[in-house]
Structure formats: structure tokens, C-alpha cells
Amino acid sequence: MTFPRFSAFPPFMRWALSAGLGLMLTACAHQPLQRAAPAAAPAAIPGQGGQSAPKQAVAPATAPATAPAAAPAAAAEANLPKEELTQDVLYEYLLAEIAGQRGALGLSAQAYADLAKKTRDPRIAKRAVEIALYAHMPAAALDAARIWYEADPSSTQALQALTTLLIASKREEEALPYLQKLLARDASGNDFLQLHRLFAGNPDKALTLKLVQQLAQPYPKVAQAHFAVAEAAEGAGKSELALAEVREASKLKPDWELAVLLEAQLLQRQSNALALQRLAAFLDQYPKAREVRMSYARLLIGEHKYAAARAQFQTLSKDFPDNADVVFAVGALSLQLQDYAQAEANFKRLLTMAYHDKNTVRLYLGQIAEEQKNYPEALRWYDEVTSGELYLQAQIRHALVLNKQGKLDAARAYLQQVRTDSVEGRVQLLQAEAQMLRQAKRPREAFDLIGQALKHMPDQPDLLYDYAMLAEKLGRMDVLETSLKTLIRLQPDHAQAYNALGYSLADHNERLPEAHRLIKKALQLAPDDPFIIDSMGWVLYRMGENDQALEYLRKAYSARPDPEIAAHLGEVLWVEGRHGEAEKIWLEAAKKTPDNDALNSTIKRFKP
């Protein structure tokens, strides 16, 4: 059968054929698909005088989502090629679209690519880009994008697609002139902010910096251009250049939060104090800068300045009273500061808001009640967590509250009836039960409990570690050493296992060179852990290196004023004849934790 040329049909027949083709494609869309594909036809079939079939505009997956405003229909039609709907064109069009609907994306992409080359129609080329991307055929997508842009050089969307595909193909230098055209079309300068994302996949960060500098060079008065160079410089490891460029961006746009946030991030690598100083200065000028104040508050939390951080979040809560994250932050910081009334008020308010994680709020409310020894209220809040990831934690908290009320047997029975399908869950329940037995001065029962569980889960790291610590309490150094060495074999990077074994040897004044090697390994794995730093100080003291020991112990106590660290530091100071300093440290620690056995026994040894 020979199809007549489309233009040979009378106008009403042309309309009917268009409608029939649209119905055919719609029917195809209802067939089951082997793989998701764009379900729409292009804007118009070549030769149909600009008549548009229904379509879903799907931008290329890697292209920016913004599209230019639609041009008047007449002007758009004037720029389209005068392509007749020949038999071959119609056949290839139907082949491409129906193949896509039936999941044959490779065939559809190839047919559309061939059709784009024949017709040079930007609508067909755009569709070819879309299908090729869905089919994971980047080379075909790039070829089609070239045709699309060449056929319609005024289309920003075509230019974006071509540029993005060139960069994704690691042809950054070839993309440069197209990027320059894109940036020239954007009077706002905001397209510079897309460069970091566009070049993110390029491993050659020095080349990225060079290209971004070339792109920014014609725009010395555009803040976004300097910001883009700063981001590229940061990626290339050029911190000084990044800082200079982001500061230039701030000069050009003094109230720009994004620039000051990047500057603070760069300054933080030098010191938190410098970053805090910069953010505080910005907030003095622009007190309504929400993101900057949020970052300032979080940085204060990192510095353990909880009262100052809460003050910042309280300021935010006045300016943004309905921001649930701010309400949560004020509640959490109030709890940290033991301001239970403020904490409770904020968390209860969260329950009336559209907050995404109300189970966490209920756990916090339970903790607040528990801290105030309002145990019935604590149990009520924990019992309201009936499902989800926090359910098990709430059940454990319930049992611990029972134990605080002197109901150890009831607490153990409660834990034993909790059901969980995961190994991790069973381990948490066992650990909680063992913890209660330790607190009740029944370490032998805790030891037996964990030992029995290890018969069924012999390679469970958390249980091995707990078993070793309980063995130490019972003087079973053989079990401690065997368990920790098994744990190290299973997890060679388990810093606490090396530390525990090394510290135990040092504390018993045994095999000190081996203890030193073990603790040194632990310190390499976790150099900022104050307890491992304390262990290094303790083993050095046992080896007679008191000056070095004091350096480590002071550092550990400064990072974490724990009573056992205080006991060690005080002992070395006392032995060195610095009795006044030792007594001061012991007294400070004893006020905070008067019932700590290690601290009290150390004090009694030197001050009976």
C-alpha cells in the first residue's frame, strides 16, 4: 500500500488522521510496559502545520529543569522545517513511539535518532534525547542534542541539554563555548550556581577550576561568578583562593547568606573560633538571616556551648514560630541543660505540630519524666511508642525504669517477653538485662547470661566485648583475653577491643610493652577518644614515664572529665608530689560522681 503525501489530504481529513494517530498512541499507552518510558508523543508530527498532539514534556534527565517561556505559536511554526509527512517518516515515527511504549527502548531511541537526522526537526530531536536518556544511550542522546540545538539555536532548553550531555561525557572543554552562551543568556547570574553540580562528576578538579575561572572572567562584578570560582577552588584544594573569591562575592552582595556560609565552612578548617566570629558578625548586620543563625547555633553545639546555642534557637523560634526543627532544637538543648520545664513544653508542642518524628519526641518526654523521677509518666510516654525503629529502644527504657523503681525481676521479665526478629535487637535486649544485673552488683549472673547467649551467637562482637568486661570484673583475665582477641580477629579495626586488652594488662601491671603496643594501635584507630588517651597515659605511668603520662592524662581529662580519668590523673600528680593539684581534681570529680568505685578507692589509697 502506498501512502499519499499528508498535504494531499483535505483539511478535515488531516485533522481526522491526526486525531486517529493520537488515539492509537493513547491506546498503546495502556498496554503493560516491560520498562517505564516516556508515554507522550512529540509536540507535533512534521508536516501537520504545527498541530500539537497531547504530550508530557519530559526534560532530559541530566539537564536543568528550567525551560524558556513558550514563543508565540506563529513564530514557533515559522522556525520549524517544512517537512512532509511521508510514508517513511510516518512509519519511523510510529515504530519509534510504539517500541517505546512496549519497552523496547533501544529500538525506540535508534528510530528517533534516525528520524531526527532525516527531519532536522527540533521537536523530534528533543524526543530523541529523552528516549535515548531513558534507554541509557548517552552517545545517541548527545547526537540528538546537537541536532536539537542546531535546528533551534534560540532554545535555552536545547542548549542546556547539549551542554549537560557534553560534560557528562567528560568533554568539558568542548562544552565551554556552550556554557559561555548559556551564561550570557542569564542576566541574573544565577546560572553560575549550577556549575558546581554540572562539574561534580569530573575527577580532574584542577581542570574544573580552570574552566570555571574562564567562564567567570568576563563577569568581575557578578557575585555568583566569584562564588562559583570559590566552590571550584575548594574542590581543587585551593583554600586560600576559595576564601578570597567567596569574600569578593560577599563584597558584591553583602546580604548573601550562601556566601557567608561557604566562607564559614572554609574558616572552620582553620578553627571553629574563626567560623563563629564570621557568622556572628554577619548576624549583627543581618539578624533575620535564618540559615546563618542555624549554622551558628549548630557550630556552638559542636563547641559544647549549649546555653549559647539554645539562645540562638530561641531567637529563631521568635522569628519562625512554626518551624518544627527549631522547636525541637530548643527542646533538646533545654534537656541537655536540665531545664526540664522548657524541654517538656517544646516537646509537647511538637506533638501538636506536623513534625515528622513524633516517636523521638515521645522518647524525649519519657526521658524528661525519668530524670525527674516521675516514673509512671515516663512509662506512659515509652508505652506510646508502639511501632517503628524506636519501638525496641522504648521497650528497653520501660524495663530500665522498672529497675530504677527496685523491680529488677519485673524488669528482666519485661525484657524477656519483648519480641524482635533481628539479631541486633536480641543483642540489645541481652545487653540491657546484663546492665541491670551489673548495677545490682550481680556481675556473675550478668556474666553467665552473656556467656549463654554466646553459645548461640559466638561471633557477635558486642556480646564478646561485654563478656570480656564482665570477665574483668570477676578477675577472669583468661576469658577477657580470649574474648578480646576473638573480637580483634573478627574486627581488626575495633579500637575499643585493643584499648580494653591493653588497659587491662597495664592496670594489672603485666606485659607492659605488649599493653603499650595494643593501646598505641587503638589510638591510631581512634585518636580523639579520651578513654584511649587516658589508657595511653596510664600505661606510660606504669612504665615509669610520668611526664609523658601527665600529658596524655591532662588531655584526656580536658576532653572528658570522667571520674576514672580523674582518678588516674590525680594519682600521677600525687606520686609526682603535686598533692594540692591532685586533691583539687579528685574533689571536683567526687562532687559530680560521689559513688564511683574507682575514684573512691584511689582517694582512699593515698588519703586513708
Image: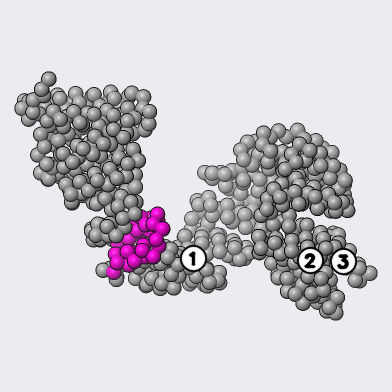
Where residue 230 appears, as percent x and y from the top left, is: 39, 67
Return the disc, 3 or 1, that comes first in the chain's sequence.
1
The answer to whether residue 533 is magenta is no
Look at the numbered discs 1 and 2 and tell me whether their residues touch, using CB distance below 8 Å.
no
**Distance (Cα) linking label 3 and label 1:** 45 Å
Q: Report the disc number at residue 513.
A: 2
Q: Where is residue 571 drawn, in percent x and y? A: 84, 71
**Amino acid, disc 1:** Gln
Please tell me which residue is depicted at 77% across the width and 77% down the height of the picture.
547
Q: Main secondary structure of the magenta part?
A: helix
* Disc 2 element: helix
Q: Which residue of the protein is positioned furthest toward the right in this rendering?
A: 608
Q: Quadrant of the N terminus?
A: top left
Give 498 or 528, whichever is nearer the viewer: 498
Is tag 3's residue or tag 2's residue first in the polypeptide sequence? 2
Q: Which residue is mark 1?
A: 265
Q: Nearer the viewer, residue 20 or 289?
A: 20
Give, as a single range, the part of the protein colored magenta: 189-217
Q: Nearer the viewer, mark 1 or mark 2?
A: 2
Q: Is residue 214 magenta?
A: yes
Which residue is pictured at 27% across the width and 57% down the height? 174
Task: Return the disc, 1 or 2, that comes first in the chain's sequence.
Answer: 1
Choose between 84 and 187: the one closer to the eye.
84
Question: What's the residue at 31%, 55% (across, down)?
Answer: 171
Label 3 Cα neighbours within 10 Å, binned few <14 / some 14-19 / many ≥20: some
Residue assigned mark 3: 602
What's the colour scheme? Answer: one colour
